[in-house]
Image: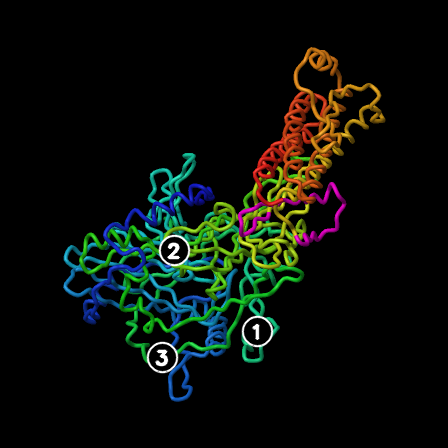
Amino acid sequence: MSSPHLRLNRRSLLTSLGIAGTASLAGCSATEPAPDRSTTTLSEERTRELAEAYAPTLYFDAAEKWFPTDPRTYESEQDGEVVVDGFDALNEYTAASKESDTPPELTMFYHGVSYEDSPLSAIQFWYYSAFDQFTTNFHWHDWEVLHVFVDTETEEPQLYVASSHSRKVPNNEFLDPDPDTQPRILSELGSHSSALSVNEIADRFQRLSVDGALADITNSAIETIQDVIDLPIAYGLPRDEGSRLPYLIPEYEGAPLYEHDRLPAVEREDLIDEGLTVSSFRELASPPSELPARATGLVFQYAGRDETDEIEAEASVDAEYDLVPTSEIEHITAFTGPQLSFEFAVPQFAEDAIAGHITSTGVPWEQPRYDEPAKDISDRNHRATLAERYDAIGAPASASTVVASLSEAVSNDEAPDNEGLTTADLGVEGVALLESDPEAIPTFNGVAVVDDVPAGEHQLTVNGAGVEPHSETVGVADSGVTPAGVEGSIPLVARENATKLEVDPADADSDLTDLAVEDDFAGRLYDAPLSGSDAVYVHRGGAYTAEVRDSDDEIGAIRVNQAATDADERVRLDNPQTGKASLATYLADVAEETSSAVAAVEEGDDGDSDDSDNTDDDTETTDSDGTNETTNSRGGSDRAGRNKTLEGSENAIRGLRRALEAITESARRAAERAAAGDRGQADQSLANVQDRLERAATRLAEASDSLPDDIERASERRVEQSRRRSDQALAADKL
């Protein structure tokens, strides 16, 4: 039975994070948690007793290469200290694996602590793997941990915390597990991130309760506004939830790792299978669609278990592991290896930059969570619950969280060809990187949640296989949720469909502070601070409005529609301006573009666009400066009579085209007058634009049965956009 593939709704995600971030904070500091009491190491006998009682069953992916082993096998002495060298561990483990039917030296390490003057204790299960290969990183050595918080008076477990990729990623946690059910760990392929399994579907991860079966986590629920779905915030097990994860081939010094002369036992087939890997995200023209789903492989259980914890009636444990106290390996001072890095492309003006993120593995017994396991509780409501039950646990702090839901910008079938977009599921998991933190964060269900982000400005970059990168500046407060992108949504673009929109404000006449990009059909797709030259990747099949804002809160707009202008693939906006002239020019460009599209329909209907039938009802008026400008006459029996004559396809479309041309004329006049410093006449022309927009809306309704559906829909959206921009133009203080 497969777990349901459910994706997060952007608004429900933000709502839930707001709830999760505030609901459990009564009585605690806004930024600092109340301190936990100190801990002491449990006696050897008591620790062993708890370790045997809660030793988890481990379920690995069928494609897994690196299983829990004993690092002492690979230890050596360097500068008088005992270390485990990455080359030695990977090479020797690989060689031993080829000589054995079962993974070599299956070992689980354990450590136990008790909180001072409290019945609350924690037993930790640590397991070591020789290598980590994943979609966001790869590194020598890998340690994973499961914390089991136990009340030693009632002998009942209180909380399971299974570690995900880092403290920045929400762990998989379960509050008040069944004391009669053995904990189970579902290990993520390559990365070994630990998902929990607590219900009867032993080898599958369930984010939600389905058909009466328990969910495998109790992390804070997503609250939806539109009553669609509720989802908890935890990393989970993406490949078991329908997501696709393309793995990367690790390289060192510019060559595949398996070619290194210190790894003679390691060959290509000793890494993650080729069917799951790519050499780089940028080698793909679009997100990969043919990647195998997760399948259960080897299952391991503690050798001292009396009864086998079966997956199903016909499936059994493949091998047994030994339980060893961590005190026997605490003499190891370091897990070493040359730094491996994963490269990110960061969109910039002109050529993209490359930013690396680094990953490394520390020594577990030197980490704060080793003796303070509550530091690994990532769900604030879980910590709050333990704090209510036990004085030894401090109340949670309200942390700062950056969140974004990833999607893909794709062509919209309801728009004219190459002139409108919509968004769809990205289909593959992505990667988020904060410039201030050198560790990449994988998404789950297409959502990036970066926790414990320091206050201040951060550069957020999002990457994915087969898509161009997205980068923006996000301002993070001391606490609460910061949605990145547009209200938490970041649409990415497949490389095969992408073009770069570059903005160079070097010679702009004001201090530009913000850039936004809207598509006629998909709405706002990008909205972020602007500081100097910048670039954003957009789908070449969109019809865009680029909006800039300056330090005086004045607005400017530029029309970008490559399909309508036959522009080169790369679009550069040099010296974008704000104020009336900018907005009026935009209005003229949109009206002219739309009238050209309508004229093409008109020509297709009757072979020419002769205006001799004089169905237009515009008249010419004289402005206060003595110049003539065509304007619309309102009311009168003659007008009513002429409206009745607008019958048939030809006249209806022609009337719309002329109304749009009149908007173009008035808008160009407004731009000229604003540029000349004539506010009064510029506003008069803008008022004429607004009158003519209403006229165009009427003509559009009259021509609706005669226009192709896609042209009608595009025209409706452009008229509505123009109404908004004309209001901004009239309200602008800056000419």
Going from N to C along the chain, the mark reached first, 2 or 3, is: 3
Q: Quadrant of the N terminus?
A: top left
- Tell me: residue 495, above or below residue 211: below
Segment tinted magenta in the rendering: 548-575
Residue at 36 percent across and 42 percent down: it is: 209
Is residue 715 within the magenta segment? no
Q: Which residue is mark 3?
A: 332
* Amino acid type, mark 1: Tyr
Q: Of marks 1 and 3, which one's residue comes earlier in the chain?
A: 1
Q: Position of residue 640 (x, y in %)?
A: 69, 13
Marks 2 and 3 sit apart, C-alpha to C-alpha, by 35 Å
The residue tagged with tag 2: helix, strand or loop?
Answer: strand
Relative image position of residue 28 (x, y in whole percent): 25, 55
Q: Nearer the viewer, residue 45 or 172?
A: 172
Q: What's the CA distance linking mark 1 and mark 3?
A: 25 Å
Instruction: Name the amino acid type tagged 2.
Output: Ser
Circles 1 and 2: CB distance less than 8 Å? no
| Circles 1, 3 touching at the beta carbon (< 8 Å) | no
x%, y% of residue 540?
68, 47
Q: Whole-percent x and y of residue 637?
A: 69, 11
